[in-house]
Image: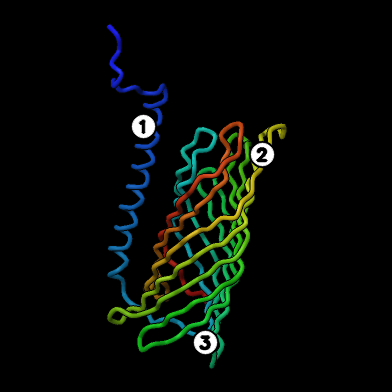
């Protein structure tokens, strides 16, 4: 008997693809639940006053990059992020200078980042609105079995912020738009197989912060998400591009 023309046909790798999709969804779901729980706990923390003028802070956070598949690995992992951030607003002026140096690491992924930004702030009662721009750089490295995939982002960043207060608790919402020249490169363990690609790309990010006090030290909790419109990939023979998402949940403490 001949097969119906409308009988469903499953490709040989359908089960594998479905399993990978399910695993990726479950990873995202677990991270999302953790972020919601983190926010619920920290939102009830004791308040601290916002610091104006000059400040130096350090951030410690759970870092979850959800990257494209690489060398048979799903690309989803959970790791640790730390950074040093500096801020100075000039007395009598609305302009501030900001900078940060970031390092993050998970199972087989590392990321280094640097920003230098000029930002202007306008005050309306208890609300502060700000906007600025500057230089931004991110260096991503994935290494599995000594096969290395690098993503280098260099370009400009545009920022916008809103600072207000709920009760006695200052709250910040920071938005980021990254405009980057992306260079992707793959080098095999023996150095014989290589690949590279390049394109202009954008990234989008949002951080939500609120004041807390940890062991008597003023600080802020931070929840954030970044979307990378393009991330260089390697399929075993060719370079390509895919998107990626990065989740962050942690706190930053005032050092100065």
Give me the residue at 29% from left, 78% from top: 166
Could you tell me which secondary element the residue under label 2 belongs to?
strand
Residue 5 pos. (x, y %)? 31, 18
In the displayed structure, 42 sits above or below 31; it is below
Query: Regarding mark 3 in the picture, which secondary structure is present there?
Result: loop
Coloring basis for residues: rainbow
> Would you say the residues marked 2 and 3 are in contact, meaning their CB atoms lie under 8 Å apart?
no
Q: Earlier in the sequence, mark 2 or mark 3?
A: 3
Q: Secondary structure at mark 1?
A: helix
Residue drawn at x 57%, y 62% as measured from the top left:
179
Binning the other alpha carbons within 10 Å of mark 2 as few (below 14), some (14 to 19) or many (20 upward) gives some
| Residue linked to disc 1 | 18
Q: Earlier in the sequence, mark 3 or mark 1?
A: 1
What residue do we see at 33% from left, 77% from top? Answer: 47
Above or below 84: residue 90:
below
Quote the CA–CA distance across marks 3 and 1: 53 Å
Indicate left or right for 241 with 205 as reference.
Answer: right
Residue ID for mark 3: 94
CA separation in Å, label 1 and label 2: 29 Å
Pointer 3 and pointer 1: residues touching (CB < 8 Å)?
no
For marks 1 and 2 on the same chain, the one whose residue lies earlier in the sequence: 1
Instruction: Residue 197: give x, y in percent of width and height.
Output: 64, 45
Near mark 1 (Cα within 10 A), the count class, few <14, some 14-19 or many ≥20, is: few
Apparent side of residue 203 relative to residue 220 in the rendered image (left or right) = right
Q: As drawn, is 217 to the left or to the right of 105? A: left
Instruction: Give the residue at x 51% y 74%.
Output: 255
Mark 3 residue crowding within 10 angstroms, few (<14) / some (14–19) / many (20+): few
x then y, percent, for residue 44:
27, 70
In the picture, the disc for residue 107 is none
Residue, disc 2: 195
């Amino acid at each position: 008997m001949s097969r119906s023309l409308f009988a469903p046909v499953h490709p040989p790798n359908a089960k594998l693809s479905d399993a990978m999709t399910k695993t990726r969804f479950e990873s995202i779901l677990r991270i999302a639940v953790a972020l919601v729980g983190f926010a619920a706990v920290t939102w009830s923390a004791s308040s601290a006053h916002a610091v104006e003028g000059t400040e130096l802070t350090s951030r410690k956070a759970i870092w979850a990059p959800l990257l494209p598949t690489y060398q048979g690995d799903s690309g989803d992992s959970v790791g640790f992020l730390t950074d040093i951030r500096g801020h100075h607003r000039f007395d009598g002026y609305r302009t501030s200078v900001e900078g940060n140096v970031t390092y993050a690491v998970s199972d087989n992924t590392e990321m280094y980042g640097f920003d230098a930004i000029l930002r202007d702030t306008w005050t309306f009662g208890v609300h502060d609105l700000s906007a600025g721009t500057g230089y931004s750089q991110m260096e991503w490295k994935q290494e599995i079995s000594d096969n290395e995939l690098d993503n280098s982002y260099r370009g400009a960043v545009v920022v916008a912020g809103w600072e207000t207060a709920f009760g006695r608790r200052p709250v910040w919402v920071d938005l980021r738009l990254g405009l980057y020249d992306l260079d992707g490169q793959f080098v095999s363990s023996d150095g014989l197989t290589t690949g590279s690609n390049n394109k202009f790309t954008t990234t989008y990010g949002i951080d939500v912060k609120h004041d807390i006090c940890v062991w008597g030290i003023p600080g802020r909790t931070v929840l954030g998400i970044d979307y990378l419109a393009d991330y260089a990939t390697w399929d075993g023979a060719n370079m390509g591009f895919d998107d990626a998402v990065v989740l962050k949940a942690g706190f930053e403490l005032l050092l100065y």
